[in-house]
Amino acid sequence: MSNFKTKDKYDRPIISLRISITNRCNVNCLYCHHDGMLPSSKEMTSDEIYTICKIAKEIGVSKIRLSGGEPLIRQDIVDIVKKIASLNFKDISITTNGTLLSKYAKPLKEAGLDRINVSLDSLNPETYKKITQKDYLKNAKEGIIEATNVGLYPVKINMVLMKGINENEVQDMFRFSKEHNIILQLIELMKSENCEDNQFSEEYHYDVGKLEKTLAEQADDVKTRDFMQDRKKYFINGGELEVVRPMDNTRFCENCTRLRITPEGKIKPCLLRNDNLVELVKYIREGSTEEELKNLFLEGINKREPFNTD
């Protein structure tokens, strides 16, 4: 780890920064945390996002991921990516629901986007509509295919598994992924600090551990990804699957190398906590120097603690 510029007090390097550039969205997924809606006039500007990325680069961050809400809902999304790309990061990616991707895939690729993750939990129109409350499945599938056509690589599908809703659709999703040279990520439904969301999680949580045993038996090869929470990648009949298990998983925390920025422009040291945020954009708007902003980043990094330690 000595090659990394900035590490937290648990010797975890800070490699990537995930920036939630909006909490507005055009779907309404069952498992979403439904944070209070931030008006577009209060969102970070493309210049503010650029400044954040510039400081992040200086402290050693090499990867940027843009997320939401739905990041493609922002009309300046291509400009945002272009500005970030001018800083020469190793990797720039976006997580999207894919419903607007057929429009934006090519201009985003041309602006400097490297790869993309698409949240898609079902290929069944009725199930998709039940999960998202919208009838956008066709749009999402077209967006995914367009992303592969324009050369974004890898394209990944994020599939959140929910008991009694879509856990029996893994094989269908895997077949679709293999057909289009896409990596499938199976994601364990997370707990939340929100009581209503937690109740949903407990009711619909699907034990991904059992599925992993089956995948291991079927796999032609299994690899472990360094600095990705020891995440397993399964190679089966020419296709790739990854399994993401943040719940009650000490390895997830031990190998966490990511810092986050909320839609309000605050540093979020831990995915699973909201009680240790650090103001950032507020100080950009007040004219703080780059050195002062860098110190705020370091304050956020110093607040990082493993959420699961047992």
Image (cartoon, grey):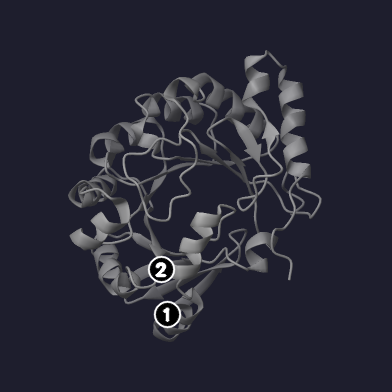
* Up-down relation of residue 169 to residue 265 (above or below): below
Q: For residue 123, say whether it is visible.
A: no
- Where in the figure is residue 151, as x and y percent of width and height? 31, 45
Q: Circle 2: is it few (<14), some (14-19), or many (20+) Cα within 10 Å?
A: many
Q: For residue 287, say whether it is visible.
A: yes
- Where in the figure is residue 27, as x and y percent of width and height? 32, 44
Question: Quarter of the image holding residue 302?
Answer: top right
- Where in the figure is residue 152, as x and y percent of width and height? 34, 45
Callout 2–callout 1 Cβ contact below 8 Å: yes
Q: What residue type is disc 1 on?
A: Leu
Seen from this angle, which residue lies furthest bottom?
Answer: 217
Q: What residue type is disc 2 on?
A: Leu
The total of numbered circles placed on residues is 2
- Where in the figure is residue 11, as x and y percent of width and height? 78, 54
**What secondary structure is found at the residue carrying circle 1?**
helix
Q: Circle 1: is it few (<14), some (14-19), or many (20+) Cα within 10 Å?
A: some
Quadrant where the N terminus lies? bottom right
Q: Which residue is mark 1?
A: 215
Q: Which residue is mark 2?
A: 241
